[in-house]
Image: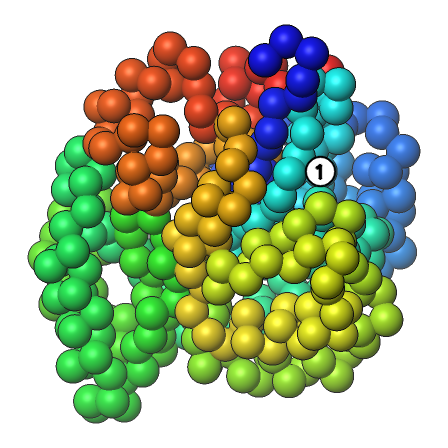
Amino acid sequence: MSGTRERLLVVCPGRGTYNQTEWGSLLRHAAGSEWLARFDARRREAGLPTLSELDGEMPFRQSLHGRGEHAAPLIHACALADLLAIDPGRYEIVAVTGNSMGWYIALAAGGALEHEEAFTLIGSMGLMMQEALIGGQLLYPWVDEQWRPQWSRRRELLALIGRLHGEEERELYLSIELGGMLVFGGNEAGLAALSEALPPRERFPLRLPQHAAFHTPLQREVRDAARERFTAAPFRAPRVPLVDGRGHVWTPWSCDPRALWDYTLGEQLVAPYDFTAALRVGVREFAPDRIVIPGPGATLGGATAQALIQLGWQGLDDKAAFQARQAEDPLLISMGIEAQRNLVVG
């Protein structure tokens, strides 16, 4: 590919990606940056610990760092540090998508929101969801150990939540289509019944700590409050195409900013987020050479690889084939892994 830039699809991470092992990664990559100083000043004015303090001075505690008003802006800042480090001379970002909260980061990465505006939106939504903390989320795989699709298992899981929902005041919904896993959202009664009904499999079923029932009707109250608080004014057509949680593409030349606001603070909050569909559209419509996941961490890599295996992208058909290709010439670059980050930074 001499003389041409490689095409990248950027996949922005969601909640749950900043954990003990990621503590310190923000300052490692962004200490002294002017934009981080601005973010810190904004949080100081709001009476919140700064991102630099959370990442460098306060020892990691899940009960603190995992709270929405801290976790969400930390993840945004880590992703921003990585995005700014990608070498524009060698790589062209042709489209941006994200998983769940990663959609807000994608809005900034694609230019539909300025990073300051995205910082406000991300921090505020994290706080609103933390204060409401309606319901929770539970994760369960439907692929086999080699990440090959088991479609009958997927159908059985969806049928199970259909049977449990509505009984004994249980509420259960599909929350996120996450590669080879399904994320379910529901109230406590629903999640308890689902956890009991699912056959144990390694560490699953896995309850996600400090997560509300995102992308389900249980978030209607948060949606209504967000629409009152945030206007469509800061939204604009993106500079780079965005693929949302339905697989819909928002292009620089055809985007209605108010419709983008309406989706972001409307359907996106209360309907299932189809991360798998977003990836499918991203790779088929924009033909990237590689897929890049900015930090923190690398937990989204497995789900992304599982989705690519379902698509048969670049001949991938199971976990072993994916790992062999990664060892030879990585198609999927997780910037939370330092050796992979070094492949794309300037």
Q: Quadrant of residue 236?
A: bottom right
Image quadrant occupied by the C terminus: top right
- Is 65 positioned to the left or the right of 226 in the image? left
Q: Is residue 244 left or right of residue 134?
A: right
**Residue 3 placed where, x, y %?**
69, 12
Front residue of 95/213: it is 95
Q: Does 325 sit above or below residue 166? A: above
Tell me where residue 198 appears, x and y as whole percent: 14, 62
x and y percent of residue 218 in the render?
46, 81
Q: In the picture shown, does residue 231 fall above or below 59?
A: below
Residue at 22 percent across and 23 percent down: it is 320
Question: Element type at marker 1?
Answer: helix
Quadrant assignment for the N terminus: top right
Q: Which residue is mark 1?
A: 80
- Of 18 and 241, the residue lying toward us: 241
Q: Residues within 10 Å of mark 1 (few under 14, many from 20)?
A: many
For badge 1, the amino acid type reads Leu
